Image (cartoon, rainbow, N blue to C red):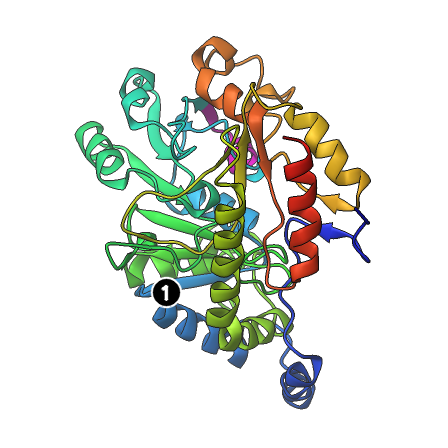
Amino acid sequence: MSKPTSPIYVTEPHLPPLEEFMPYLQAIWDKKRLTNSGPFHQQLEAELAAYLGVEHLSLFANGTLALVTALQALRISGEVITTPYTFAATTHSLLWNGIKPVFVDIDPATCNLDPRRIEEAITPATTAILPVHCYGFPCDMERIEQIADTYGLKFIYDAAHAFGVRRHSESILRYGDLSILSFHATKVFNTFEGGAIICPNAKIKQRIDYLKNFGFADEVTVVAPGINGKMNEVEAAMGLLQLKHIDAALEARAAIYQHYAEALAGIPTLTLLQPPAETGWNHAYCPVLVSADHPISRDTLFERLKANDIHARRYFYPLISSFPMYRGLPSANPERLGNAHRIADQVICLPIHPALTDNDLASILDILHTAR
């Protein structure tokens, strides 16, 4: 078995042909409008909203700034119930707003916040729920909404992985008080760096647009202590070009995922995670659980892949609740987060992106099968 000719990563930026990008750059140079809600920014907001099937969308320089601003926009404070099984930005956004995260265990089938555990974590200080559509798998949105309504809580979805995901033919971004997307270079849809907040109405979008531009309503009126979260014109242009190719990229991801599913079907100690039924998924990641009965451990498999220039990810490991700034919280007690710890110790995400070749997939699967 030979190494691949170049390193293979879990995700790679989906870059359209350079010659297609040059006219956008020329237009930016000619108009000399580089940022501050320029024409490409406005066009991308409109086209993304139409593509995603949502009514209002506000672009951001990155998904983390979008999360921080969303919490500000809804005036969230006190305690927020969230998941330990996520990327650091989810929970860090709470600390940046002076909010105490309260961790709740996950559903092992979806890796999402388990609604059955939410109510027992609610206290008089709880103001909101911050679930994550992990790997783009939809949360149990109806149950979470029911709990939020019963207790008068806001709920914001970290939908960083969920670009274009639908359930029962409807965008999952339409759920919650707000949903947040990431357009980081490694995401299904990217603008180099970028993100967005999905808004339910024009009024909240206006407040969010003020907040992401230092709180300015006009040249002389500041209405809120805002931040600089604006997306620039070059990133917006990249997004417009990406939209032209996104459907082909999603089809390629789906084909690669199906290839993995068929190839791993005969290895019972490797479980390929899948979204709930009736989900129009984006194949953002390819998470596999390595059971304790597998001939080699998850970490040994990870190192074996790495030694062969295949850079898989133990995503998410370690848990957020294990980080120094969180592990002292009562809700971070490992005994309360059994499912999350077990999944974190077993998961490995295999490479999945349109640039993968048949030879790349053969190299990956050779290692997975020789470790049986």
Magenta stretch: residue 250 in it?
no
- The residue located at (43%, 39%) in the rendering is 132
Name the residue rendered at 42%, 69% in the picture.
Answer: 48
Residue that appears at 49% across and 30% down: 268
Residue 98, position in %: x, y? 51, 30
Res. 195 visible in picture: yes
Which range is magenta?
90-101
Q: Quadrant of residue 370?
A: top right
Residue 258 placed where, x, y %?
47, 53
- Judge by depth and name the residue closer to the eye, 177 or 337: 337
Alpha-carbon neighbours of circle 1 within 10 Å: few (<14), some, or many (≥20)?
some
Location of residue 20 with respect to 302 vertically, above or below: below
User: Looking at the picture, does residue 75 appear above or below residue 116?
Assistant: below
Q: Left or right: 35 with respect to 197? A: right
Quadrant including the C terminus = top right
Q: Secondary structure at mark 1?
A: helix
Q: Which residue is mark 1?
A: 52
- Residue 95 magenta-highlighted: yes
Give the left or right position of residue 78, taking residue 140 as reference.
right
Specify the quadrant of the image occupied by residue 273. top left
Count of numbered circles on the image: 1
Closer to the camera, 8 or 159? 8
Does any portion of residue 216 appear in the rendered image? no
Residue depicted at 30% across the width and 65% down the height: 55
